[in-house]
Amino acid sequence: MKEIKQRSQVQLGQHLLMLSWVVAFALATNAQTSRPSSGVLLSPQRTTILSPSCQISQLQLRIRTGNDDLRGGGNNLNVEIHFADGTAQFANNVNKNGNWANNSINTIPIQLNRPVGPSEIKQIRLIHLAQGGYTPPQGGGAGMLGTVAAPIALANGVKSEDNWDMAEFQANGIGNNSHSSIPIASFGLHRFTGSNPSLEINARPNVACAAAGQVTGLNFTFKTGNDDLRGGNDNLNITVQFADGTVQSEMNANQSQRWADGNTNHVSMVLNHPVTLNQIRQVQLQTTFQGGSGGDNWNMDSVEITAFVDGKITPLATSGFHRFSADQSGPTAKLLTIGVK
């Protein structure tokens, strides 16, 4: 009887211990899942709130035309901006019916309907309205109708569909700080025709704001001496070389325009990815001079290169006098390399 009583006491103790474990587990579970009277979770989910300084409120498109212009008039360019949430914003006739001449560079600001994080822009679509048509003869031309010259008058009224060569496209996001420019998307040569009127350009993956101390853009200040840069087909290309072996070029930096004797001209370049100052190794200036009896020469008195870092201008490199010609090497070479310390 004594052994039976002891065994019962042990079993009772085990049951009580197990019951206490169950109660403790239930209380712990209830503490994690139940809502207090305030209705707020004890351990709320963390949500990432994008800093206002890391948002963009405007897209700035920089589009360079190649050897076939955008006609304008009824032949214009529409832009669609597609966001990660499936919505889109439309900007029609961004050239405002104007002609974009061969080799011209055009900058178009598009104000966003709402500030967004740079990675929220997923795609930019360009739509070229290549419209043909027929304009009846007017004035003196109308008098030719019914004569042997009628076919010529009628042919002059026919307008073919416009074709347009886009040589380069760059979209940058402009943040709350006017100096903050974030590369969103880019593209090279594309020919728009009546049968191929649109182009979809995907945004860069993992676009982010520049970190503290990173360079977002470069500015070049050129002083011309007593021999001008002619422009037209005689132009200047700029190439920046980075420590990782990549390069970024600004082709036709003078936009085919003449840089006159004794003048100062500025060129800005937004970097396609932010870098630290020590990641910029060198800058190359190269002219497109062909030589010959009518070839161009250019006396560059000096160039000053500065960097945009944290919204401030920081000196990067300078170079003094150089006479550019069509020579491949020597003191008047068409290529000048400027090291960055």
Image (tube, rainbow, N blue to C red):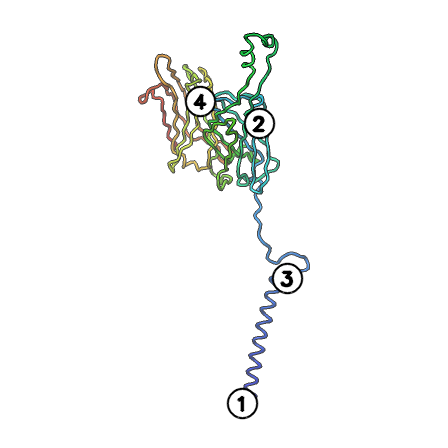
Query: Which element type, helix, strand or loop, lies under badge 1?
Result: helix
- Residue ID for mark 2: 94
Give the residue at x 55% y 83%.
10
Give residue 34's mark.
3
- Residue ID for mark 1: 3
Is 7 displayed left or right of 262 in the figure?
right
Mark 4 and mark 3 in contact? Answer it, CB < 8 Å. Answer: no
Query: In the rendered image, which quarter is residue 250 located in?
Result: top left
Query: Which element type, helix, strand or loop, lies under badge 3?
Result: loop
Mark 2 and mark 1 in contact? Answer it, CB < 8 Å. Answer: no
The kind of residue on which mark 4 rests is: Phe
Which circle, 4 or 3, is nearer the viewer? 3
- Residue ID for mark 4: 222
Quick one: label 3 or label 2, which is nearer the N terminus?
Answer: 3
Q: Nearer the viewer, residue 213 or 279?
A: 279
Is residue 33 visible in the rendered image? The answer is yes
Which circle, 2 or 1, is nearer the viewer? 2
